[in-house]
Amino acid sequence: MAQETQFVLNSFSFLIWGVLIMWMCAGFTMLESGSVRTKNASVICLKNVGLYAIAGLTFYLVGYNLMYVGVDNLIGGFRIFYGTSAEEQALLGGDAAAAAAVLENGNSVMSDWFFQMVFVATTSSIVSGTLAERVRLWSFFVFVAVLTAFIYPVVGAWTWGGGWLDQLGFQDFAGSTIVHSTGGWAALAGAIIVGARHGKYREDGSIKPTPPSNVPVVTLGIFILWMGWFAFNGGSQLALSGVVDAVAISNILVNTNLAACGGFIAAIALSRPIFGRTDLLASLNGAIAGLVAITAGPDIVDHYWAIIIGAVGGSICTLGMKMLERLRIDDVVGAISAHLFAGIWGTLAVCIVAGGNLLVQVVGILAVGAFVFSASMLTWVVIRKLMGVRVTLDVERHGQDVVELGIEAYPEFVVLQDPDL
């Protein structure tokens, strides 16, 4: 009975954590739709629902099997992940003898699949925010399919799938590199290939300011992401079957919260000397960067380290946003700074307090970065050749909502602003 109870708790926790992580997609939708011009908000909503649907299908058909079977084992023949195990099917069919075999797994197969799948969707959302307002809808969807079916699962196979980085001792508890830097590298490649929004970087060297169009919506998105991160990190304990797990998850959630707080305070303090003002988006991204930074090692015991790691992450994010501006790389929501730069820091920070090996961590960061960036660049280049990646100047001026969807996110606002009315 004790083993059965552990199985139930583990499976149920995977499912509940997964639902909360899925809710992060709503957070990304709010953050992005509030950051772009109102003429592009509808496309953002469609993109975020679409990327979640694509991630679900591709990770079921290809990605999960690739991640946990491994590339080498797929060379001899491709096989699809079919889901529920034979033992579980027998159990559902009324075969009580199958129970013993099922319990040995510690949790149901599909609860694990669901938990892993929502991580993949999070990676895709990072790319969506960076390329907002100028990337073609279907070109973006094609890239998401490649990212979730192949690029992310290969990184996962190297690490969480028991591959060569895992065997070296690479540590990334919940995915500072595996999830967030992967999304950041993919977003950086896309930003380079797609280019900046028209008029963002002027010929005289000045930068066109593009503040959020809906600040309350952006703020709501940050809070949703903050809440979902508790499941992101807490669920990565991968068990809820005893006192040890309960204490560990409690520490993980507290550290996650403290890191976000530290990241926000550091970012808001640095924003004025760096940007000349108390910058809203930089401050909010500081909280995200703190969350990303602690994700590699949220299971540390000394909680003050979580504050330090988060604060450094928020500082790096703020400096990174300024650096990308000078490099003329257009990142609409600051995702590259928050997820890639802070993710690298968080992966290195494991060496300070969580026993990580610096050389191994650096090798992991470089290997993942080289693979994801090059694979993403190649994918974007191929998509550009086959179907184009950027909307026309006319579409960009009028907005993707009207031209691509024939709908306005805020039609009443548009009417009121019409000078002829």
Image (cartoon, rainbow, N blue to C red):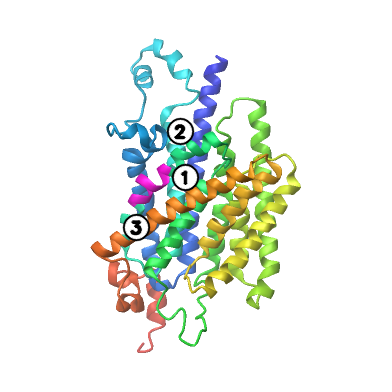
Badge 2 or badge 1: first in the primary sequence: 2
Residue 368 in magenta?
Answer: no
Asked if residue 152 lies left or right of residue 212, the reply is left
How far apart in space, not on screen, are marks 3 and 2 (Cα)? 31 Å
Q: Is residue 254 visible?
A: yes
Given residues 150 and 363, the one toward you in this image is 363
Q: Residues within 10 Å of mark 2 (few under 14, many from 20)?
A: some
Badge 1 local density, few (<14 within 10 Å), some, or many (20+)?
many
Q: Which tag is nearer the camera, tag 3 or tag 2?
A: 3
In reply to whether residue 153 is colored magenta, the answer given is yes
Mark 3 against mark 1, which lies toward the viewer?
Answer: 3
Mark 3 neighbour density, 10 Å: few (under 14) some (14–19) many (20 or more): some
Quadrant (top left, top right, bottom left, bottom right) of the C terminus: bottom left
- The residue that disc 2 covers is 112
Q: Residue at x 35, y 45 (%)?
A: 149
Residue 119 — which label?
Answer: 1
Secondary element under disc 3, as helix, strand or loop, is helix
Location of residue 92 in the rendering, given as x and y in whole percent from the top left corner: 36, 20
Using the image, tell me which numbered label, if any, was put on residue 378: 3
Q: Quadrant of the N terminus?
A: top right
| Magenta extent | 145-154
Tell me where residue 225 appears, x and y as whole percent. 54, 53
Q: Residue at x 35, y 74 (%)?
A: 399
